[in-house]
Image (tube, rainbow, N blue to C red):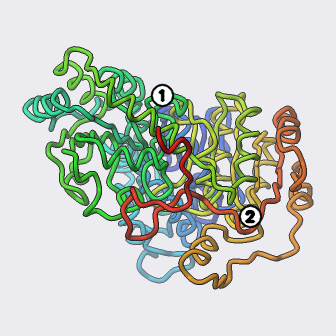
């Protein structure tokens, strides 16, 4: 059947099972938006307040569902406004499709109105990108883009479609899309056998997990694996939720703002099994002292991560589900590390997650939230101190339920991500944990929340400062608070109400549990401003360049344990 390019885009989206797209119209995507209008009963469009919000919403949709999020923008500034969202998704391996319009082919390269080379601009922040210059290639390009976005290590793909391609007509042949088979073509039995031998010979094994476990939907396999090998497990920020944080095997986050227990355990283990995680500088800190007593086994779908920052004894290249199943088959029977696990448990009692008085109020507020927020709810965060406090004090029980910008550290991410999570899970509670500095970056997305009556909760930890930068200025720059004090007389409650969203406030002497319980019960959009001290700090912390076992801001309990 003959369809326009815009109609072909819609049909390809529907082939892939896409039910929702996020975007903002403009001159070079009018034909595409006309096709969206004609197909509004088949595909839902969410109009965000800004294209960056659309990209973060598509990201949040993807992370919370495991499906591919889709965002749309026009040419020029519309397309460039997607770049931060694409980079965020790229760093955290999130499958996403961005569709941009561009000027007609005859105007390309002529500095035409709202023309940019978005393919060139996004080359380093996408897994792949295209500009479609032939209508005959459009459908195949769309299908290939979806395949690339989700196969192997996932990531964002951009498709730039000039306006005349959108209006041109071509014969469209529908296709049945098959889900990609988990990648295991590079999996070598000898690598699995060597890893299994190391695991069986180990007396003090530890697992370090990352977001790759969640992207591979391998949480069940992981939990079975750690039980089988009788080992503790620590996580990167991106791996939170793969193991229930209340599990006696879970030691907490690893690295700069990890737990003392995790960091010490990593440097005491004799085998570190790294699963779906990269050796980020925020995790390893001083590489020359990281896990020096341990042999390292690394399991990842992306061979580019092997021996990049830390050398490994053996690496297994495969989809994590496949690799863990193969490993468990080789290990065959349950291992016993009772003495090691007892040592880890003594460390848990000796080093609590956080006891410093410098973050007493944020701890109180987030622990109160943890009591009243549904266990099956979704948490998104912005980036900063509040992000680390949320990771420390909120229980992470399920994969895909804690959404945060890890690799890029994008302030302004959480509100858009919360929109994506809420749209995809209309019957679940979604809350964005924000700082006043981060939230102001994309506060305009309150318009989207109000427009679609999304019951998103936003908790602003308001310390009237760029808190994490202020913490560094306090600790390492002699208290020179250069441009980090946010003393603008901004009333967040009134701002929320101006958008048609309910506003609430938690003052320093208020009982946070009572107010947060009311907010959860509302089942409508609400912004809760929580006033906290400006100099509360995220502890424990590893100073820049120090070993991860050399932490500041912690206190020992039961030092003789």
For residue 317, side relative to residue 370 (left or right): left
Estimate the x, y position of residue 93 in percent, counting from the top left.
41, 49
Q: Point out which mark residue 544 bears.
A: none
Regarding mark 1 in the picture, which secondary structure is present there?
Answer: loop
Above or below for 409 versus 520: below
Where the N terminus falls, by quadrant? top left
Q: Are marks 2 and 1 in contact (CB under 8 Å)?
A: no
Estimate the x, y position of residue 50 in percent, counting from the top left.
67, 62
For residue 45, side relative to residue 80 (left or right): right
Regarding mark 2 in the picture, which secondary structure is present there?
Answer: helix
Q: Is residue 52 visible?
A: no
Return the disc, 2 or 1, that comes first in the chain's sequence: 1
Looking at this rendering, what residue extends furthest in the left direction? 190
413 and 45: which is toward the camera: 413
Residue depicted at x 83% and y 50%: 528
For residue 508, side relative to residue 309 (left or right): right
Disc 2 designates what residue? 436
Residue depicted at x 92% and y 60%: 494
| Badge 2: residue crowd in 10 Å (few <14, some 14–19, many ≥20) | many
Location of residue 547 by image quarter: bottom left
Q: Is residue 493 visible?
A: yes
| Badge 1: residue crowd in 10 Å (few <14, some 14–19, many ≥20) | few
Q: CA distance from mark 2 to mark 1?
A: 35 Å
Disc 1 designates what residue? 248
Above or below for 212 versus 388: above
213 and 25: which is toward the camera: 213
For residue 166, side relative to residue 444 (left or right): left
Estimate the x, y position of residue 5 in percent, counting from the top left.
48, 50
Q: How many marks?
A: 2
Location of residue 220 by image quarter: top left
135 and 489: which is toward the camera: 489
Residue depicted at x 23% and y 36%: 318
């Amino acid at each position: 059947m003959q369809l326009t390019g815009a109609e072909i885009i819609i049909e390809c989206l529907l082939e892939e099972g896409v039910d929702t797209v996020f975007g903002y119209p403009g001159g070079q995507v009018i034909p595409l938006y006309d096709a969206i209008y004609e197909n509004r009963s088949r595909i839902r469009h969410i109009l965000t307040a800004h294209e960056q919000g659309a990209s973060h919403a598509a990201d949040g949709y993807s992370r919370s569902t495991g499906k591919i999020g889709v965002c749309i923008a026009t040419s020029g500034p519309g397309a460039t406004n997607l770049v931060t969202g694409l980079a965020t998704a790229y760093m955290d391996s999130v499958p996403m499709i961005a569709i941009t319009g561009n000027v007609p082919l005859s105007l390309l390269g002529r500095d035409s109105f709202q023309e940019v080379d978005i393919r060139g601009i996004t080359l380093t922040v996408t897994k792949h990108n295209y500009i479609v210059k032939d209508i005959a290639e459009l459908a195949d390009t769309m299908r290939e883009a979806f395949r690339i976005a989700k196969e192997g290590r996932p990531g964002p793909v951009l498709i730039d479609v000039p306006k005349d391609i959108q209006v041109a007509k071509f014969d469209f042949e529908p296709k049945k899309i098959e889900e990609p088979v988990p990648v295991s073509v590079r999996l070598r039995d000898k690598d699995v056998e060597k890893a299994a031998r190391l695991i069986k010979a180990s007396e003090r094994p530890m697992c370090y997990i990352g977001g790759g476990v969640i992207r591979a939907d391998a949480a069940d396999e992981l939990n079975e694996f750690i039980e089988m090998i009788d080992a503790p497990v620590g996580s990167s920020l991106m791996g939170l939720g793969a193991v229930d944080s209340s599990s006696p095997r879970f030691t907490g986050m690893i690295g700069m703002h990890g737990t003392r227990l995790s960091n010490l355990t990593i440097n005491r283990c004799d085998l570190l099994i790294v699963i779906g995680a990269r050796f980020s500088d925020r995790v390893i800190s001083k590489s020359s002292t990281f896990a020096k007593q341990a042999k390292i086994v690394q399991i990842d779908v992306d061979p580019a991560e092997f021996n990049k920052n830390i050398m490994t004894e053996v690496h297994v290249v495969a989809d994590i589900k496949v690799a863990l199943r193969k490993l468990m088959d080789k290990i065959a029977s349950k291992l016993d590390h009772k003495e090691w696990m007892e040592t880890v448990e003594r460390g848990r009692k000796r080093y609590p997650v956080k006891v410093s008085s410098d973050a007493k109020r944020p701890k109180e507020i987030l622990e109160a939230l943890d009591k009243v927020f549904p266990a099956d709810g979704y948490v998104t965060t912005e980036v900063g101190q509040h992000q680390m406090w949320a990771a420390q004090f909120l229980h992470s029980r399920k994969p895909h339920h804690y959404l945060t910008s890890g690799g890029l550290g994008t302030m302004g991410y959480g509100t858009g991500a919360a929109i994506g999570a809420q749209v995809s899970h209309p019957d679940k509670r979604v809350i964005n944990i924000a700082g006043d500095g981060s939230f102001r970056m994309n506060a305009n997305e309150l318009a989207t929340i109000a427009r679609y009556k999304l019951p998103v909760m936003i908790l602003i930890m308001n310390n009237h400062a760029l808190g994490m930068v202020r913490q560094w200025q306090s600790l390492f720059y002699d208290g020179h608070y250069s441009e980090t004090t946010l003393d603008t007389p901004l009333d967040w409650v009134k701002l929320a109400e101006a958008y048609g969203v309910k506003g609430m406030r938690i003052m320093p002497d208020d009982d946070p549990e009572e107010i947060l319980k009311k907010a959860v019960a509302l089942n409508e959009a609400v912004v809760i401003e929580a006033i906290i001290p400006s100099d509360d700090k995220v502890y424990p912390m590893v100073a820049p360049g120090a070993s991860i076992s050399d932490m500041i801001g912690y206190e020992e309990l039961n030092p003789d344990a």
